[in-house]
Image (spheres, grey):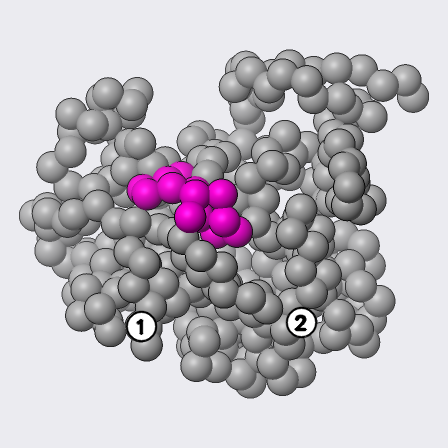
Amino acid sequence: MADFNVNHITNKNGDQGPTIAGVTTVSSTGAMRIPSGATDYGRIIKEDPYYEFLSIALPFNEPAGSQVFRDYSKYGDQYIVVNNVVQKSDQSKFYGSSVYFDGSADRIYSPTVTGYTVGDRYSGGKFGSWTWECWVRHDGSENATGMLLVDNTVDQVSNGYYGRSINIEGNDGYLQFNFQRNNGADLSRVFTGSYTNGGGYTPSTPIESDAWTHCAVSFDGPAGVWRNFIDGTLVGTVAYADQDDILRKNGVDPADVDYFLINKNSLVRKPISRRDFRSGTIHIGANHANAADYKGWLNDYRLYQGVCKYKESFTPPTQMAF
């Protein structure tokens, strides 16, 4: 099929999205050719015009039995494996294989701790936007908290507790997001299922365990808004408290969002200051202390630093192609 050009993205309802200049596609699915330079990163990633912001691009498409996990972002890392994280062919969303975490202190993590300068691996700038997404098949037999993303730095403070964390709690649980710093003394729950203290909003839709689900969390830095998506449907929106003027300035109607609360059953807002999400290292499958283990399979794991990819419901992206 002949190449053709596109200059916009459509949302789930077919409305025009942001303008993207200079994007060359190679099929009607919206597959985008990534320009190659002095490296071997000139690959095709389907339906993803935000490649330049990818900090992690892990398709998890290696042969069954492999413990090699190569990152296909421009950084090209080889992730470090802790315990028995392995590719399996018994379940997959794409490729015929996926990575499996058995819930026994399995994790992988980035091999280097990067700095906090804008443009570094996980640094999108102070209060910068970011987006995480992945195809997830959670094993419903796991009733504990399973970590899908952990970094242990927030506000440029390394400590014994993770900074950002995205996790699933229990069978048919919710996609949760928290952040904390200062050795856990400063904890904020953004999206939560069972936790009462620390605030947090319970998304409208949980994750169906034992089935493939597309999960995403985005952060709109200028507006200070987090959004939670299940299979492309917006199921929760949370914003910093007492910043309605900032929301309006950045095109967000305050009536469309929720806020940090005194606790998740309260209607009283909990004022909270802005956080700097520049980070230095990422862990997948458990936290940096091998706790809060995830049990299940993953395909097409992506973390973007510097862009809020999703602000409304969308059609989940298809597989990465090479």
Left or right: where 272 falls relative to 83: left
Residue furthest out toward the right: 1
**20 shown above or below 172:** above
How far apart are the alpha carbons under marks 2 and 1? 28 Å
**Residue 117 at x, y percent in the picture:** 42, 48
**199 shown above or below 318:** below
* Sequence-earlier tag: 2 or 1: 2
Rate crowding at label 1 as few (under 14), some (14 to 19) or many (20 or more) other CA atoms within 10 Å. Answer: some
Residue furthest out toward the left: 268
Residue range of the region highlighted in magenta in the rendering = 117-129
Residue type beneath disc 1: Asn
Residue at image location 60% in from the left, 81% down from the top: 82
**Residue 240 at x, y percent in the picture:** 20, 42
- The image quadrant of residue 16 is top right
Residue, disc 2 = 100
Rate crowding at label 2 as few (under 14), some (14 to 19) or many (20 or more) other CA atoms within 10 Å. Answer: many
Residue at image location 37% in from the left, 59% down from the top: 164
- The image quadrant of residue 91 is bottom right
Residue type beneath disc 2: Tyr
**Mark 1, secondary structure of its residue:** loop
Left or right: where 68 falls relative to 81: right
Q: Can residue 44 be seen in this view?
A: no
Mark linked to residue 184: none
Residue at image location 28% in from the left, 56% down from the top: 155
Whether label 2 touches label 1, CB < 8 Å: no
**Mark 2, secondary structure of its residue:** strand
**50 shown above or below 3:** below
Mark linked to residue 159: 1
**Residue 38 at x, y percent in the picture:** 77, 41
- The image quadrant of residue 165 is bottom left
